[in-house]
């Protein structure tokens, strides 16, 4: 493979981007603490995930798709989990699972594209930013150059929170092919122009990343033989290779459940729970559970009222999971108020998603969050130092 073929393999979705990081002075965050983001693409229905099973309004709003009370995995006298999430119950009992209820942002946008852009860039709903929130964090205080990359995106070409100039981010849709092709990318010439020097620098970064990232570490953990299970396996192998990365992002697709939600969401939540349980097992196996923080997120939740197709339409606030060996397990935020919906029939927000990002930046990595988030947000007290 020649240089041009390798660099255009972006179209084949084997590697998305590697651009040089700006080295700025400042306090060094503890990037030995790993962040793993799990995106629930399409907008997961939080009410059938974290269920207010003691609420009569919940069953009135969802006469066909509500989870029967006797099937709910009860967390306390009012709140429980979808039965498909049973693999997460050991984490709940060991206080390694936090559930943040009512997460959203002011003036929510119900477009898939625009709302996930807001989450990825940590923007206000009325502003448009070009770089992801993790990109801004890595530019402000870069990870060590000895790391194979600042971040790795598994199973998709979109860089999301690592988009924009200034971060070394790799998108792995086929890790074995990436590593194999990277061997042919070693620079063999001197640069005679600025554009060529940039290309050669990208190639050099790719080779550096491929030298550290392997996809064949002999993990004993068993992973589900599903696309999400395979992506979790790849993420775990990136960690096991000890290549050095600050953040990993994995996506689970299919949550836009406008019709026939019950079966679709049950399957997806089973995939999610089994994947997260396997990820914990692999991180324990590799000695990284105590230094890993796992967050789920999505562009929005769903409306409290079911629609005529046995599904739910785009909504606002939702519940998300935070997992890790140093997580302070429990319920955070406010339980959804189903008798206090807004004028569009949507849930009120109790936690701004940027409060969770501030938690990552300040409590997990030990860096100032105000510049990254372009404002001050109070971290949640859900991780131990």
Image (cartoon, rainbow, N blue to C red):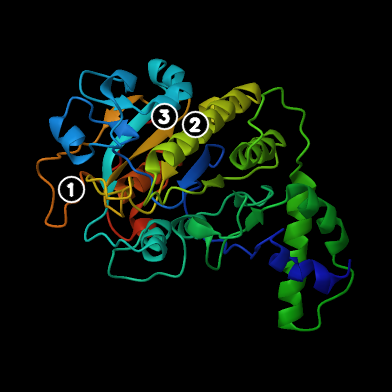
In this rendering, would 328 be left or right of 15?
left
Identify the residue at image location x=67%, y=25%. Answer: 222
In the rendered image, which quarter contains the C terminus? top left
Identify the residue at image location x=25%, y=19%. Answer: 76
Residue indicated by mark 3: 385
Point out residue 282 in the picture as x, y percentages from the top left corner: 63, 27
Point out residue 237 in the picture as x, y percentages from the top left corner: 69, 36
Residue indicated by mark 2: 270
Residue depth check, mark 2 versus mark 1: number of the one nearer the observer: 2
Residue indicated by mark 1: 348
Residue depth check, mark 2 versus mark 3: number of the one nearer the observer: 2
**Mark 2 or 3, nearer chain start:** 2
Crowdedness of circle 3 by 10 Å Cα count: few (<14), some, many (20+)? Answer: few
Alpha-carbon span between mark 2 and mark 1: 27 Å
The quadrant where residue 215 appears: top right
Residue depth check, mark 1 versus mark 3: number of the one nearer the observer: 1
Identify the residue at image location x=43%, y=39%. Answer: 265
**Mark 1 or 3, nearer chain start:** 1
Residue 166 or residue 226, whichever sits in front: 226
Point out residue 326 in the picture as x, y percentages from the top left corner: 44, 26
Point out residue 285 in the picture as x, y percentages from the top left corner: 65, 22
User: SS class of the residue under badge 1?
Assistant: loop
Alpha-carbon span between mark 1 and mark 3: 31 Å
Residue 342 or residue 233, whichever sits in front: 342
User: SS class of the residue under badge 3?
Assistant: loop
**Mark 2 or 1, nearer chain start:** 2
Residue 56 or residue 160, whichever sits in front: 56
């Amino acid at each position: 493979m020649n240089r041009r073929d390798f660099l255009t393999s972006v179209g084949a979705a084997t590697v998305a981007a590697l651009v040089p990081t700006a080295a700025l002075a400042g306090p060094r965050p503890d990037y030995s603490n790993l962040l793993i983001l799990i995106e629930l693409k399409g907008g997961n229905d939080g009410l059938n995930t974290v269920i207010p099973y003691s609420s009569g309004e919940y069953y009135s709003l969802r006469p066909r798709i509500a989870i029967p009370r006797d099937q709910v995995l009860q967390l306390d006298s009012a709140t429980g989990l979808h039965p498909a999430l049973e693999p997460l119950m050991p984490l709940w009992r060991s206080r390694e699972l936090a559930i943040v209820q009512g997460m959203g942002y002011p003036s929510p946008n119900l477009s898939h594209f625009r709302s996930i852009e807001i989450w990825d860039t940590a923007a206000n709903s009325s502003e448009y930013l070009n770089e992801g929130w993790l990109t801004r964090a890595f530019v402000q205080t870069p990870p060590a150059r000895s790391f194979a990359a600042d971040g790795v995106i598994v199973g998709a070409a979109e860089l999301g929170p690592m988009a924009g100039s200034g971060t070394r981010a790799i998108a792995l849709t086929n890790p074995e092919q990436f590593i194999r092709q990277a061997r042919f990318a070693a620079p063999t010439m001197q640069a005679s122009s600025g554009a060529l020097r940039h290309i050669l620098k990208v190639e050099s970064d790719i080779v550096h990343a491929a030298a550290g990232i392997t996809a064949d570490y002999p993990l004993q953990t068993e992973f589900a033989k599903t696309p999400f299970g395979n992506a979790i396996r790849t993420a775990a192998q990136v960690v096991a290779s000890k290549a050095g990365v600050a953040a990993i992002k994995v996506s689970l697709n299919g949550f836009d459940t406008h019709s026939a939600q019950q079966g679709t969401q049950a399957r997806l939540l089973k995939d999610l729970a089994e994947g997260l349980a396997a990820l914990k097992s692999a991180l324990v196996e590799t000695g990284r559970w105590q230094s890993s923080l796992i967050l789920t997120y999505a562009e929005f939740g769903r409306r409290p009222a079911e629609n005529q197709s046995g599904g739910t339409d785009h909504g606002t606030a939702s519940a998300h999971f935070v997992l890790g060996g140093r997580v302070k397990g429990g319920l955070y935020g406010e339980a959804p108020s189903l008798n206090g919906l807004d004028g569009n029939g949507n849930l009120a927000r109790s936690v701004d998603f940027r409060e969770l990002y501030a938690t990552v930046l300040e409590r997990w990595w030990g860096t100032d969050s105000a510049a990254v988030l372009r404002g001050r947000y109070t971290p949640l007290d859900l991780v131990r130092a």
